[in-house]
Image: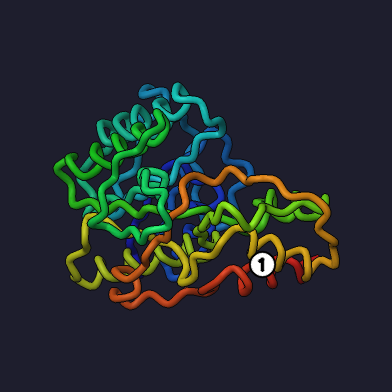
Amino acid sequence: MQEQRVLIAGCGDVGTRLGIKLSAQGAQVFGLRRTINQLPTGIHGIAADLADPASLRSLPRCDWVFYTAAAGRPDPETYQRVYVDGLRHLLAALPQPPRHLFLTGSSRVYAQSGHEWVDEQSLAAPESESGRILLASEQLALQSGLPATVVRFSGIYGPGRDHLQLLVRTGTAAPASPLHYSNRIHSDDCAGVLEHLLQLAAGGQVLHPLYLASDDTPAPIHEVMEWLAEQMGVRIHQRQPVRRGGSRRCSNRRLRASGYRFIHPDFRSGYAELLSSP
């Protein structure tokens, strides 16, 4: 990664984890976000707002661009501003075409809900407005004229993303029926996947336009919550559905075939590390 210049636009949790990895390998990393005081050493902060094209007028020339912005609110207006308008503004502001554009997407673009497996060839026909906006963001990246790759992440968990643990701590778990499969990926693996794909591209390998990134083990959500309760020493005394999209199973076969090996291949590995952290 010597002397490579990398721009991470929307440099939040996943983007920062990626930036730390790339900086440690010798890359010059630029992290674009509205407030840069929380960026760690090794990431050069660019204070800018993706919703404001005027703030993007002096972007550095970079070999690789990652768009990892995340909407802070789930309403369609915010999604449109962050995932579509922000990406369009960034693409227009780049001073030169990068070698490759990477966009972080979401498995929420799938509408399948019958426990079936989905992969990169599966139909993406989101039923929600937010899902349609996410799909529009993918199309914008892939039709930009740049070499581009979209990485669809399933449910991200990790430090600071402890909603499920907090719910289990109240003695709540999802019911076993109706069956509901869930899919997840640890935030460390999110950064690991992006780093891996960059290394492949830098080595001259032609990337697919789309990768589905989820761990090896889709699991019924009630099993995940019951396992968490056992590890936490909590007795489940109430059952309630957990809203986590449709019941489907995400296949990571293409990503695995590219040579990526998961840091946390299943929820037990990832959550065990989280629960053991002070």
Residue 234, above or below 72: below
Looking at the picture, how far across and down is residue 259, in whole percent?
33, 78
Q: Quadrant of the C terminus?
A: bottom right
Task: Place residue 234 in its image quadrant.
Answer: bottom right
Relative to 175, is 89 on the left or the right?
Answer: left
Is 208 or 240 nearer to us in this picture?
Answer: 240
Q: Residue at x 54, y 56 (%)?
A: 179
- In this orientation, which residue lies closer to the viewer: 142 or 249? 249
Q: Give amino acid for label 1.
A: Tyr
Does residue 199 appear to the left or right of 24 in the view shown? left
Q: Residue at x 17, y 66 (%)?
A: 206
Asked which quadrant contains residue 223, the reply is: bottom right
Q: Position of residue 203 (x, y in %)?
A: 23, 73
Image height check: is 48 above or below 156?
A: above
Q: Evaluate whether residue 272 shows in this view.
A: yes
Residue tagged by mark 1?
271
Q: Is residue 190 left or right of residue 169?
A: left
Q: Residue 105 in the image: state x and y as whole percent.
A: 38, 47
Residue sitting at 32 percent across and 71 percent down? 253
Q: Quadrant of the N terminus?
A: bottom left
Residue extending farthest to the left is 145
Q: Position of residue 246 (x, y in %)?
A: 46, 47
User: What residue lies at 73% left-to-right and 56% top-to-bottom?
Assistant: 165
**Crowding near the residue tagged with mark 1, few <14, some 14–19, many ≥20 C-alpha atoms within 10 Å:** many
